Image (cartoon, rainbow, N blue to C red):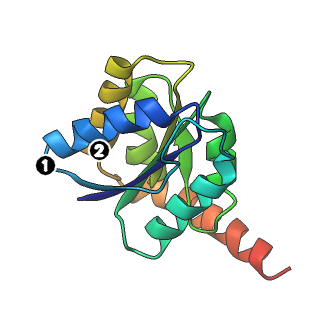
Amino acid sequence: MKIAIGSDHVGYEMKRDIMAYLIEKGIECKDFGPYSTERADYPDFAVAVSKAVINGEYDKGILICGTGIGISIAANKVNGIRAVVCSEPYSAQLSRQHNDTNILAFGARVIGIELAKMIVDHWLQANYEGGRHQGRVDKIKAIEKSQSTQ
């Protein structure tokens, strides 16, 4: 599995910790920036990670900002991205199982590193169930398609 990861300046330290955690687990990941705690705008990194996921260069993405909200909103503007912001493991797991999310976001000012690791684990270990959920995912895709033709 290959994970694209990005943040803003607020999420920089947690991003580094999550990357180390993933690498320790044998998961390949790439840092899409920023590369310091100098002020940085989260939409730039949300788009870079989203494009890497959509283009198939990476299987999934992880994004971190202060709350996870802004960076997930930016990611969700990219067609084909289904980003979820989570502050606990159960929602992360269900987002994969029911919504086939491909980007996980969380907030460095909202959760600590140990909870972040638990959320990441639940999200990565869960698989999309398809079935009754597929129709809903297809409707989301249809909304994206209709927006791209306007």
Question: Do tag 2 and tag 1 residues touch (Cβ < 8 Å)?
Answer: no
Give the secondary structure at mark 2: helix
Residue 107 position in % (x across, y down): 55, 28
Of the pair 144 and 22, the residue shown nearer to us: 22
Identity, as a three-letter code, of the amino acid under mark 2:
Leu
- The residue lying at 57 percent from left, 20 percent from top is 109
Towards the viewer: 97 or 68: 68
Return the residue at label 2: 124
Looking at the image, which residue is at 49% across and 36% down? 12
Kind of residue indicated by mark 1 = Gly
Residue pushed farthest right? 150
Question: Which image quarter is the C terminus in?
Answer: bottom right
Q: Which residue is mark 1?
A: 26
Q: Is residue 56 left or right of residue 29?
A: right
- Tag nearer the camera, 2 or 1: 1
Q: Position of residue 88 (x, y in %)?
A: 44, 22
> Where residue 25 sits: x, y (%)?
14, 41
Q: Is residue 96 above or below residue 28?
A: above
Q: Position of residue 61 (x, y in %)?
A: 43, 53
The answer to whether residue 101 shows anywhere in this view is: no
Occupied quadrant, residue 114? top left
